[in-house]
Amino acid sequence: MKVSLREIRKVFSDGTHALRGVSLDVFPGEVLALLGENGAGKTTLMKILSGIYRPTSGEIYVDGRRVKPKNARDALKLGIAMVHQHLSLIPGLTALENVAVLEGASLSPVSTELRRRVEKIAEELGFEIEWDRDVEELPLGMRQRVEIVKALYWGAQLLILDEPTTVLSPPEVKSLFQVVKRLKEQGRSVVYITHKIPEVMEIADRVVVLRRGLKSAEFSPPYDAKRLVEAMVGEVKTEAVERLGKPGERPVLEVKDLWVYDGDRAVVQGVDLVVREREILAIVGVEGNGQEHLVETIVGVRKRSRGMIKIYGGYAYIPDDRQKKALVLEMSLVENAIIGKENEFAKRGLISWQQAERFTAKLIEEFGIVAPGPWSSARQLSGGNQQKLVVGRELSRGAKLIVAHQPTRGLDVATTEYVQTLLIKTRNAGVGVLLVTSDLDEAYKIADTIAVMYRGKIVAYGPVEEMGIELVGKKMAGL
Amino acid sequence: MRRLALSLLNTGLALFLAFVLGAIAMWISGYDPLLSYKSMLLTPLSDLTYLFSALAFSAPILLTGLTFAVGLKAGLFNIGAEGQTYMGALGAVAAAYLTRDVSALPLAAFLGVAFAVAWSAIPALLKIWRGVNEVVGTIMMNWVAYWLVIMAVSTIFANPSQPEESVKMPEAARLTPLVAGTDLTLAVPLAYLTAVLIYVFLRYSVWGYRISISGQNPTVAKAYGIRPEQAVLVAFGIGALTAGLAGVLQVVARPPSYSLARNLANVYGLGFDGITAAMLGRGHPIGVLLASVFLGILQEGARHMQIEVGTPFEFIRVIQGLLILFLALQMLRKI
């Protein structure tokens, strides 16, 4: 099956020009990587192809015939399916039921015929899936496989994988690549959406790079990583900042034998850690191994069940979800900028909004936040600028400890670089940083010390020089 | 600016629909809608006495409206103003019972507000400690207050010479009309000043800011050291202050009786009128002020409508009910 997109444009109702005229072909049996930064339009383009969005203008052809998929089911009938970054299985149903249920159709009892066909598809791909368990109980990697099987069961000839490795540990990534190769051998096409260059180099037959809603380049092997990056981000100008000096002796955070329960499940199980001055301690691990509970207990959002937490000299907190945990989107930048330090702007209990506005203007300038003005609402900012606002606010607290949870998630390359640089600079100035990340590149790039978290426990801990990637990868997977 | 325009448009639309459907109801029932509306909306503005009476109606509605508005800011659906108003009035009656000179006035204010605050503390604490939804808690307390106050007014605080009402405020402790022959007492400027103070509190005070943050996003509040439970407590407390004040004023500053009717007629329904005012005023204190003046005019106008055109007073309830319905629909859509 050959799929062609012609001059696709998409303008969202808030005025964002997500796509400005992109044309693209996908040939049978090829793995096409769609590379680009967050916000480049990759996902939007593929959501149009899979019927979730309608294009503002432009045409779609399947084997030369013009098509207009109205929803995901329409697209599936044409043989196009998308596996989303945030998987879209229905909790409460078993894996098999999830395969059986199709958008807009009612759930009928699962027949043995269906089970037989599903198991055959899984076997061909080398999957071992516990079909009768509630999907919520399955690990993320397995849920992804369920979605792939579901797409194939309903006859997908073109499979779109949106950032499929975000939720996977290194060994799971390897086996995903095997699956992609097998799909290709079966004559199906795969569109692989990513912003990770190493993945592209490993599996793509062809690479199309998007930048700001336009196709900026197209490559075929052999690839040159440097040229891929350039096509993705334009010219990057960043000053390289390195960690200076060894970590100090004095601790800024001590955690001893910390246990946190969620209901009656022990999510954090006896964690010990110390962050010292001038140290970046990275806690790495696949998401969902207790990191969130650990962080939120340290900053006091959750209650600990047992153990000790000591913070010396105050803390600043960069949460993993800026829209839900760090900002009040309906409120202005000024109101958001003073959260947690409102007392500093108050005299006799009354806040001086003038003073708060001056402070916000300073943040905007210092951290290069692109905003219509200090009184515009936080919602109006792009994701990257929202994060800069959060990071700016937190760094300006002057705390001795910074708790940074996935501080660069969803940011484009330039902003990621910027935030990481800021963290290193702050560290060099003597602050301790607790960095919790699932991005190993980030951990190796900026951390002094690495700890691996698996199922609520710290399973490996040591200076970055002693923590080889092989070892860390194994520990992350629980091996 | 655009948001303000949109919200005005929405409010206007709700008003328009409520009045159109109200007109249809009148027409079906055999009354002339145009004449009725003319009498309802214009007569109160035609004479200073009528206008002052409308303003007197607006004062308690404004105060209970502020209760609901402050609750909304904190993310609460605090409909406890009704019961807190009863308790405020009860406090005033207790003061009248205890002292028979001018000191009854400050005592009334103190007791009334104290009763109301204590009353609101129960649903607030139930919410904080046990997670009881504030709607359930406040409705419960409203009914407990209703029967409790009726009992008190019928027994210890009953007026021996006029059994249908409570003991009267001593004459020296009454807030009498500022303009003789009208209902306009100090209650009106006092209520308007309260609205301005609440505005300043919400807009400029540290606690007003904390209430807004925890109301909009308690997760964010918690992450940065603002405790949402404290915000809930403060919001409930401030709300009870204004609702209690409404109850006190309905006794000490409401000619001609200066007492609490045994069937609670002079406080009954104020809390719910306040919800209409708060929703119509979009939760902004100054908006609530304007809305309560408008509702005061309707209240006064309805009497004239009944006298001049013969359209029953109850149609005002129909229109207010429809208005709440349309405003609530808009609110639901936003959520």
Image (cartoon, coloured by chain):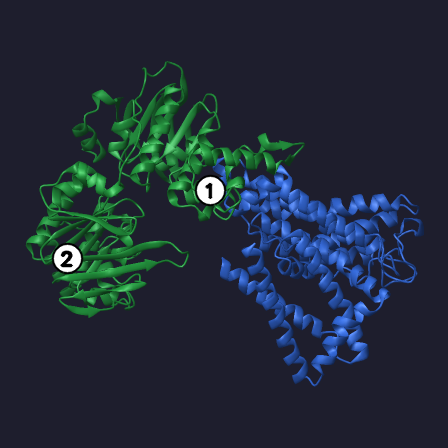
| Picture quadrant of residue A1 | bottom left
User: Height in image: B99 above or below A236?
Assistant: below
Residue at the image position 35 percent from the left and 54 percent from the top: A17
In the rendered image, what is the letter of the chain coloured blue?
Answer: B
Are discs 2 and 1 less than 8 Å apart at CB? no
For disc 1, the marked residue is A327
- In front: label 2 or label 1: 2
For disc 2, the marked residue is A26
Instruction: Determine the chain carrying the residue at label 2.
Output: A
**Label 1: element kind:** loop
Left or right of residue B176, residue A307 in this image = left
Image quadrant holding the C terminus of chain A, namely top left
User: Height in image: B11 above or below B129?
Assistant: below
Q: CA distance from mark 2 to mark 1?
A: 40 Å
Q: Position of residue B319 (x, y in %)?
A: 66, 71
Q: Amino acid at mark 2?
A: Val
Instruction: Determine the chain carrying the residue at label 1.
Output: A
Q: Amino acid at mark 1?
A: Leu
Q: Is residue A170 visible?
A: yes
**Label 2: element kind:** strand
User: Height in image: A120 above or below A164?
Assistant: below
Left or right of residue B78, residue A79 in this image = left
Q: Position of residue B11 (x, y in %)?
A: 60, 63
Q: Earlier in the sequence, mark 2 or mark 1?
A: 2
Q: Is residue A304 visible?
A: no
Residue at the image position 18 percent from the left and 39 percent from the top: A227
What tint does the image give chain A?
green
| Picture quadrant of residue A112 | bottom left
